[in-house]
Amino acid sequence: MTFNVVQYFTLSRPYAQALFIEAKESRQLNFWLKTLHVLSILIEHRSIIAIVRNPSIPNEKVKNILLKLLSEIKLEADSLLEEKLGNFLRLLINKRKLILLPSITLLYKNLLNSSRKILEATVVSAILLNNNQKNNIKKKLEKRFNTRIKLKTAIDESLVGGGVIYVGDWVMDGSIKGKIARLSENLKEA
């Protein structure tokens, strides 16, 4: 079964919302964020994918394998959290939805950030930004969006110069590559 991106998020949303409500009520928001992040990485590993897709391995055994791997990472869960985690994994495994873990994780993280009044921004630049540049960008974004900003950076040398800023569905393209593309479009229209 294959899904497009919209379907992944549509299918993942109820799981992320239910988990967020549970985590908030039990005051375990960070535990679940870390656990979801680790699970997302685990289920993308080739050997785990082979186990999950193998119909001869019972669902309960798949769940136990994942729980054992998590316990070795030492996420510090008490018995009640372990039970809830086991139930969550059992639900995803039985419904054949483990593949949704990365999108569940992203949606959960968005809910968590929203509850904390934090927006994530990603700055992709042609060169490495220094701390002063990062702080200036962060301050300007916080002023523009009137909220705290969690800034991530990445480098894409194909931008030639400048950069692109992503905040949710808002994008500001100040890259030379973007300017050339816009100029090219304008010339085609003329």
Image: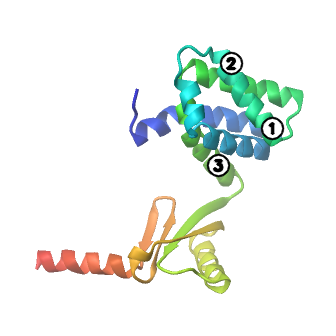
Residue 13 seen by the camera? no
Which numbered tag is attached to residue 109?
A: 3
Residue receiving disc 2: 61
Quadrant of the image occupied by residue 134: bottom right
Q: Residue at x 20, y 78 (%)?
A: 184
Q: Is residue 111 above or below residue 160?
A: above
Q: How many marks?
A: 3
> Which of disc 2 and disc 3 is earlier in sequence?
2
Tell me the kind of residue under disc 1: Glu
For the residues carrying marks 3 and 2, which lies nearer the camera in this image?
A: 2
Q: Return the residue found at the far left.
A: 190
Residue found 53% across the figure and 22% down from its top: 96
> Residue under circle 1?
72
Q: Is residue 184 left or right of residue 99?
A: left
Mark 1 crowdedness (10 Å alpha carbons): few <14, some 14-19, many ≥20:
few
User: Does label 1 or label 2 sit earlier along the sequence?
Assistant: 2
Secondary structure of the residue carrying numbered label 2: helix
The amino acid pointed to by label 2 is Lys
Q: Looking at the picture, which amino acid does disc 3 mark?
A: Lys
